[in-house]
Image: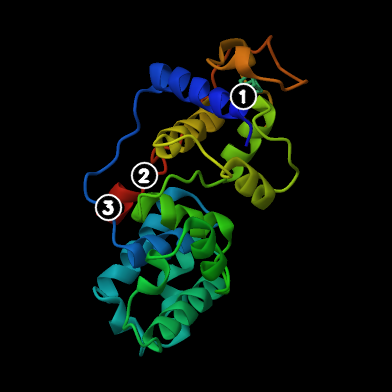
Amino acid sequence: MERKTQNKIKRVTKILVDKFGYPYRHENLPAPLDMLIATILSQNTNDKNSYKAFQNLKRKYPAWEEALSAKESTIENLVRVAGLGKQKANAIKNLLDDLNSRDEGFSLSHITELSDLNAIEELTKYDGIGVKTASCLLLFALDRNVCPVDTHVFRTVNRLGIVSEKSRDKTYFILNESFPKDIAHTFHTNLIRLGREVCTPRNPSCGVCPVEKECLFEEKNLENKTVSAERDFMLLDNVRLLN
Ligand code: SF4
């Protein structure tokens, strides 16, 4: 990544901190396997439903080893509230079975020691774990300086001109080539908030956007001075999700 792009990321981070503050972060990181399963459950649904599904699983299986003997259909019933129940149950079951077969014991220790890129490569070998899910594990549970690219980050970094890519995964790899030190969590979380509240997919509120001067989007909607009423009541906050 070019120096000027790194500087732009730093400027955007500062502007968003001035606007939204520093995002909440619990001092204790969540357990990696909790985080990974919670992120699998969060795919294609809202935070409220993925939280319910995670709680259903945790109540039934306080230790993940207890889910090893569960039928896939039982897991599916527990996670159905998060949608794609069959697919998610299958991904969770395969993951747990694989961990159980490893010499290192039942853990993600074969991942947590790897570099960011190698960890993503290993994690995405599992069915149901893509680059976004893998990078959420790195950021939120392993405290790595990576910026996952969800739908909001994808849209906003492309509109801002930080990257110019058509696929989310390519956007992730370009954005994270040499991400400025120590600010990935702040940038990622505040950008999601910007995407939800201001830089919405349709009719973005460019007229009140705090980073309008940094933005290269050709179809700016400067007439719109109304901030979207859409506001998810649970901002992606992995730690709160897991506690
Ligand atoms: S100026 Fe408009 S398009 Fe650009 S980041 Fe802000 S809301 Fe999004």
Residue at 37%, 86% in the rendered image = 100
**Which element type, helix, strand or loop, lies under badge 3?**
loop
Residue at 48%, 56% in the rendered image = 116
* 149 w.r.t. 70: above or below: above
The tag earlier along the polypeptide, 1 or 3, is: 1
Q: Quadrant of residue 237?
A: top left
Please state which of residues 181 and 60 is positioned toward the viewer in this rendering: 181
Name which residue type carries label 2. Asp
Name which residue type carries label 3. Leu
* 139 w.r.t. 43: above or below: above
Name which residue type carries label 1. Lys
Q: Which residue is mark 2?
A: 237
Q: Which residue is mark 3?
A: 29
Q: Is any atom of residue 184 visible in this view?
A: yes
Q: Which residue is mark 1?
A: 4
Residue at 53%, 32% in the rendered image = 196
Locate the C terminus by quadrant: bottom left
The tag earlier along the polypeptide, 2 or 3, is: 3
Q: Position of residue 157 (x, y in %)?
A: 62, 33
* 152 w.r.t. 219: above or below: below
Please state which of residues 33 and 45 is positioned toward the viewer in this rendering: 33
**Whether the residue under disc 1 has CB within 8 Å of ligand 1:** no
